[in-house]
Amino acid sequence: MQETIAPDPNPYTRRFRFPKWNGTITVLQEPRLFRRLPEFSHWTKLQHVQAAQDYLAYATAYLHTGASLVQYGDKTYGTDGPLISGGFRPHWPEPLKDAIRLHLHGATTFHDQSVAHWRAAGRHLSTWRTLRDTVRAEGN
């Protein structure tokens, strides 16, 4: 395993060359890399499961906040005009659109980190999806 660019302080975005992958990848694409990163080399499977659950909770919170901001925008600024990716309208104020983007992109990042830790613990993705659906149902 070889880092391809200057060391990145964020282990989730640090890029590596890895066998059987074209180009460079991160731990989000190949969870086996966790064992080779100094930040995670000593982690147990239970610690990865806990991290996956924590990141899933963060993702759910970000997703709910983003949805609340979209509802606020609908009520406050109206639903006229085309719908833009993320669920907002072009005439809404930029700070509101930026906040929606921040929360929805954050939710995606936390979901990706949750899945990577879950897979690093040796768990099946289907059980992660069941956990995700349970967490989402509890949040509603």
Image (spheres, rainbow, N blue to C red):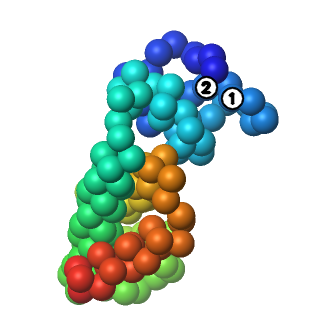
Badge 2 marks a residue whose secondary structure is strand
Residue 22 falls left or right of residue 17:
right
Percent across and percent down for residue 37 are 45, 25
Q: Is residue 131 something one can see in this rendering?
A: yes
**Which residue sits at x=35%, y=36%?**
43
Percent across and percent down for residue 49 are 35, 54
Q: Is residue 4 something one can see in this rendering?
A: no
Within 10 angstroms of label 1, few (less than 14), some, or many (20 or more) residues? some
Q: What residue type is labelled 1?
A: Phe
Q: Which amino acid does label 2 sit on?
A: Phe
Q: Is residue 14 above or below residue 140?
A: above
The quadrant in which residue 93 appears is bottom left
Camera-nearest residue between 27 and 42: 42
Q: Do the residues labelled 2 and 1 touch (CB within 8 Å)?
A: yes
> Closer to us: mark 2 or mark 1?
1
Q: Looking at the rendered structure, which numbered label has been put on residue 129?
A: none
**Which residue sits at x=67%, y=25%?**
17
Residue 33 falls left or right of residue 60:
right
Q: Quadrant of the N terminus?
A: top right
Q: Residue furthest top?
A: 6
Within 10 angstroms of label 2, few (less than 14), some, or many (20 or more) residues? some
Percent across and percent down for residue 105 are 41, 56
Residue marked by disc 2: 16
Q: Looking at the rendered structure, which numbered label has been put on residue 18?
A: 1
